[in-house]
Amino acid sequence: MPTITASVAHAFATSWIAAWNLHDLDAILHHYREDFEFSSPLIVKIANEPSGMLRGKSAVRAYWSKGLALIPNLHFELLHVLSGIDALTLVYRGHRGVVAESFWLDEHGQVYKASACYE
């Protein structure tokens, strides 16, 4: 995929944040390919996965389901949207403070890899 334009990045960000704030797992996962991989330091703690990485929608669905149950009032506030070559990064505020999450998109605009970093 070529450089992601600011308008594509903002459209993704708006849709992604809205899905999370609705706690709608189907809408959240709509942004991702079936075989995507997600890495986060929280995976070690919540999913008990030492690598900090999960692969596939079913594994990530179970992890995010557990996370939403643990934090029923979860809400994200979008702070910045950054775009690059085949990737975009969202900077947002969540329950743990500021988060930077990067998403690599395939030629159809779906996420095949994502990584979260926390304040």
Image (cartoon, rainbow, N blue to C red):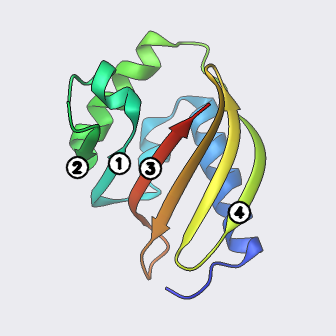
Q: CA distance from mark 2 to mark 4?
A: 24 Å
Residue 15: x and y, percent?
Answer: 64, 52
Q: Are marks 2 and 1 in contact (CB under 8 Å)?
A: yes
Residue lying farthest to the bottom in this orientation: 2
Label annotation for residue 55 = 2
Q: Residue at 27% of width from left, 58% of height from top?
A: 34
Q: Earlier in the sequence, mark 2 or mark 4?
A: 2
Task: Pick whichever, 19 or 96, lies toward us.
Answer: 96
Q: Are marks 4 and 3 in contact (CB under 8 Å)?
A: no
Residue closer to the observer: 115 or 12: 115
Question: What is the secondary structure assignment of the residue under circle 1?
Answer: strand
Q: Considering only order in the chain, which callout, 1 or 2, is on the residue closer to the N terminus? A: 1
Q: Which residue is mark 1?
A: 38
Left/right placement of residue 115 relative to residue 99 reads left
The residue tagged 3 is 115
Q: Nearer the viewer, mark 2 or mark 4?
A: 4
Q: Amino acid at mark 2?
A: Arg
- Mark 1 or mark 4, which has the lower sequence index? 1
39 relative to 12, above or below: above
State which tag comes first along the sequence, 2 or 3: 2
Question: Would you say the residues marked 3 and 1 are in contact, meaning their CB atoms lie under 8 Å apart?
Answer: yes
Which residue position is annotated with label 4? 82
